[in-house]
Image (cartoon, helix red, strand yellow):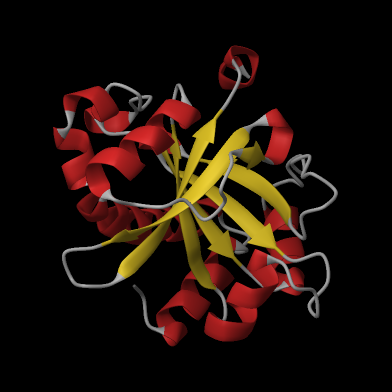
């Protein structure tokens, strides 16, 4: 993962006036997030039953979005720099605001912040503990309940939530702390979307 000063620079560049600078920063954030996530799920992809549940993106790898948690002021700066993209519809019981940025070659970022800095939600806790940075990596799946069952049975991984829960924009989600070859862990969010949502 990037050092704090590196991440601060990348976040600042995501709000640059020059589109090329914004895209370069996004590509680097995406590269860093996917590098650790894809290493963590390499075993998942070798399991034929589980691998077929992932929706494939670039290079036949799972369609991936890197979730970047930022302070509210940076959230607003980045959103303004990108033409104020639509805010996701987050369930009211979840302390988060978010919007998505898409770039060429399958580069996708979710920009996340907390609704209230003193709240007890996942984004607020992450920002308080780690500061701004890559909070999660999202992978699209066709059947989240089946994927969860396979991760429990074949990889002895327990989801963060006992049951799949509602996510942003009508998705169904759950989270796993997946170990990496370096002995760390990365938060993987499995996301199941409707066919309609995928076509938008």
Q: Is residue 165 left or right of residue 190?
A: right
Does residue 63 appear in this view?
Answer: no
Res 106 quadrant in image = top left
Res 74 quadrant in image = bottom right
| Residue at the image point whose x is 42% and y is 37% from the top | 148
* Image coords of residue 133 (percent x, y): 50, 71
Q: Is residue 44 left or right of residue 150?
A: left
| Residue at the image point whose x is 72% and y is 33% from the top | 169
Above or below: residue 151 compared with residue 197: below
Q: Is residue 85 left or right of residue 192?
A: right
Q: How many marks on residues?
A: 0
Q: Is residue 165 left or right of residue 161?
A: right
Above or below: residue 165 compared with residue 130: above
Does residue 107 appear in this view?
Answer: yes
| Residue at the image point whose x is 39% and y is 53% from the top | 30
Quarter of the picture holding the N terminus: bottom left
Above or below: residue 139 compared with residue 157: above
* Image coords of residue 77 (percent x, y): 72, 65
**Which is more toward the observer, 45 or 115?**
45
* Image coords of residue 125 (percent x, y): 64, 76
Above or below: residue 49 compared with residue 67: above
């Amino acid at each position: 993962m990037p050092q704090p000063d590196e991440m601060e620079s990348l976040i600042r560049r995501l709000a640059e006036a020059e589109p090329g600078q914004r895209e370069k920063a996004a590509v680097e954030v995406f590269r860093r997030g996917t590098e650790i996530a894809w290493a963590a799920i390499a075993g998942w992809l070798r399991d034929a039953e589980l691998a077929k549940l992932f929706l494939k993106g670039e290079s036949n790898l799972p369609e991936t979005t890197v979730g970047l948690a930022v302070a509210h002021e940076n959230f607003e700066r980045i959103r303004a720099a990108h033409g104020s993209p639509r805010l996701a519809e987050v369930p009211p019981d979840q302390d988060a605001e978010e919007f998505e940025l898409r770039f060429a070659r399958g580069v996708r970022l979710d920009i996340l912040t907390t609704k209230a800095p003193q709240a007890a939600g996942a984004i607020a806790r992450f920002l308080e503990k780690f500061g701004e940075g890559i909070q999660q990596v999202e992978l699209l799946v066709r059947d989240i309940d089946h994927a969860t069952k396979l991760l429990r049975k074949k990889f002895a991984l327990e989801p963060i939530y006992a049951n799949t829960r509602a996510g942003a924009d009508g998705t169904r989600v759950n989270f796993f702390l997946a170990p990496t070859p370096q002995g760390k862990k990365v938060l993987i969010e499995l996301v199941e979307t409707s066919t309609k949502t995928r076509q938008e």
